[in-house]
Image (tube, coloured by chain):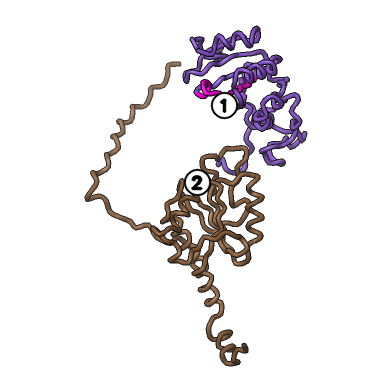
Chain colours: A purple, B brown
């Protein structure tokens, strides 16, 4: 019996931004839904994330509030989640826009949006460090940002390990006994 | 000013100069804060007018080069461990280290994190304070334990008092009686 897969998007519902999002995104909307907090969530293909980010910026969302990833290790995919918010547009101040994109786990690459949204730069660097997702176009990929340089490194091969992946094993530093 | 020969001989031979030195150190323990988490609030509380730890000579100070107690208040990550080592090595002798709070003692909430170290793997620790966060009384008690250590009698500052609570509490429930042992099983038929 197969395990119940987590949903890619919350259940669909009415939202005041939905019509505008469908018009501006066009064919990039794979699925959409409304989160329990009442925010619109849109699933987009990963190769169109830059077009979507530019369209979101035209809608009036002026910064990236959060950028994170979810590791669905059993299914071999990462779900990259962007949350956009607005300071300057008064009617959007109560709204958050969730944009999700699915990428394969064995080749996690997605285009960087750091030149469209400068506030996504640090988030992308942290996400790269914690999950190993390569944001193409961000010049800081492959460098350590928050972690200690000596930590989370494979001792045999010297390659970096990514501590928030589900298959990461915390080394025994004497704290577990 | 030249000390008179008699006084010098008195201080060196008759009076124990070491005890004078220890007395001076004991009543001027100036902690330098390494506030990496919320325990710093409790130290501020202990130094405020309510508890007033300066009655025991505990003056919170801001530079490690003029302090002699390192008060580690909170979680030490692997990056912060280098700072902790540098701060410890800049302090003049004699120096004492107090690990305050569950995070500093054993990792606390973050015990199985990929980035948290224990304080005693970086610097030698003299006194541990348990609690999350510890109370200001516990902070003052830790400084009293440093006092005792300087005096040469390391150990807990207060001994736990044994109190007989049987007049006030109901007697503990008796364990249920064990069932009578079963009869020995008959040998299975061949």
In-front residue for pair B83/B63? B63
Residue B10 x/y as whole percent: 55, 88
Q: Chain of mark 2?
A: B
State whether residue A83 is above or below residue A157. above
State the extent of the magenta-drawn residues as a range: A78-93
Which is more toward the observer, A110 or B21? A110
Write down the quadrant of residue A169 in the picture. top right
Dividing the picture into quarters, in which one does residue A18 lie? top right
In the displayed orientation, state which residue is furthest to the left.
Answer: B167
Q: Locate residue B57 relative to residue A175 in the image: left or right.
A: left
Q: In this rendering, would B93 be left or right of A138?
A: left
Which residue occupies 55% across, 44% down? B107
**What residue is drawn where x is 23% and y is 49%?**
B168
Whether residue B106 is situated above or below residue A5 in the rendered picture: below
Mark 1, other Cα within 10 Å: few <14 / some 14–19 / many ≥20: few
Dividing the image into 4 quarters, which one contains the N terminus of chain A?
Answer: top right
Residue A88's label in the rendered image is 1
Q: Taking A140 as reference, is A73 above or below it?
A: above
Instruction: Tell me, yes or no, whether dots 2 and 1 are on the same chain.
Output: no
Quadrant of the frame with the C terminus of chain A: top right
Which disc number belongs to residue B38? 2
């Amino acid at each position: 019996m197969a395990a119940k897969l987590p949903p890619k998007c919350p259940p669909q519902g009415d939202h005041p931004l939905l019509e505008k999002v469908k018009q501006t995104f066009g064919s990039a909307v794979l699925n959409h839904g409304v989160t329990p907090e009442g925010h619109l969530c849109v699933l987009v293909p990963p190769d169109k994330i830059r077009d979507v980010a530019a369209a979101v910026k035209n809608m009036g969302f002026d910064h990236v509030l959060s950028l994170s990833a979810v590791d669905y290790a059993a299914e071999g995919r990462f779900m990259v989640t962007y949350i956009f918010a607005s300071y300057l547009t008064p009617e959007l101040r109560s709204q958050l826009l969730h944009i999700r994109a699915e990428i394969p786990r064995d080749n996690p690459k997605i285009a960087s949006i750091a030149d469209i949204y400068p506030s996504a730069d640090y988030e992308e660097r942290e996400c790269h460090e914690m999950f190993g997702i390569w944001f193409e176009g961000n010049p800081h990929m492959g460098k350590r940002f928050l972690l200690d340089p000596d930590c989370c490194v494979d001792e045999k091969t010297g390659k970096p390990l990514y501590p928030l992946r589900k298959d990461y094993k915390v080394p025994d530093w004497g704290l577990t006994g | 000013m030249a000390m008179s020969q008699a006084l010098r001989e008195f201080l060196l031979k008759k009076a124990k100069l070491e005890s004078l030195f220890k007395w001076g150190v004991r009543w001027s323990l100036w902690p330098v804060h390494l506030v990496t988490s919320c325990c710093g609030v409790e130290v501020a509380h202990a130094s405020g007018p309510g508890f007033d730890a300066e009655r025991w000579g505990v003056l919170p100070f801001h530079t490690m080069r003029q302090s002699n107690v390192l008060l580690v208040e909170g979680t030490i990550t692997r990056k912060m461990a280098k700072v902790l080592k540098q701060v410890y090595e800049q302090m003049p002798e004699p120096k004492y280290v107090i690990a305050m709070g569950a995070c500093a003692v054993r990792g606390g909430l973050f015990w199985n994190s990929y980035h948290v170290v224990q304080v005693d793997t970086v610097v030698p620790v003299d006194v541990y304070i348990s609690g999350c966060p510890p109370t200001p009384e516990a902070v003052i008690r830790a400084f009293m334990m440093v006092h005792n250590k300087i005096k040469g009698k390391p150990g807990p500052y207060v001994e736990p008092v044994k109190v007989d609570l049987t007049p006030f509490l109901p007697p503990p429930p008796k364990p249920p009686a064990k069932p009578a042992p079963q009869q020995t099983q008959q040998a299975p038929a061949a």
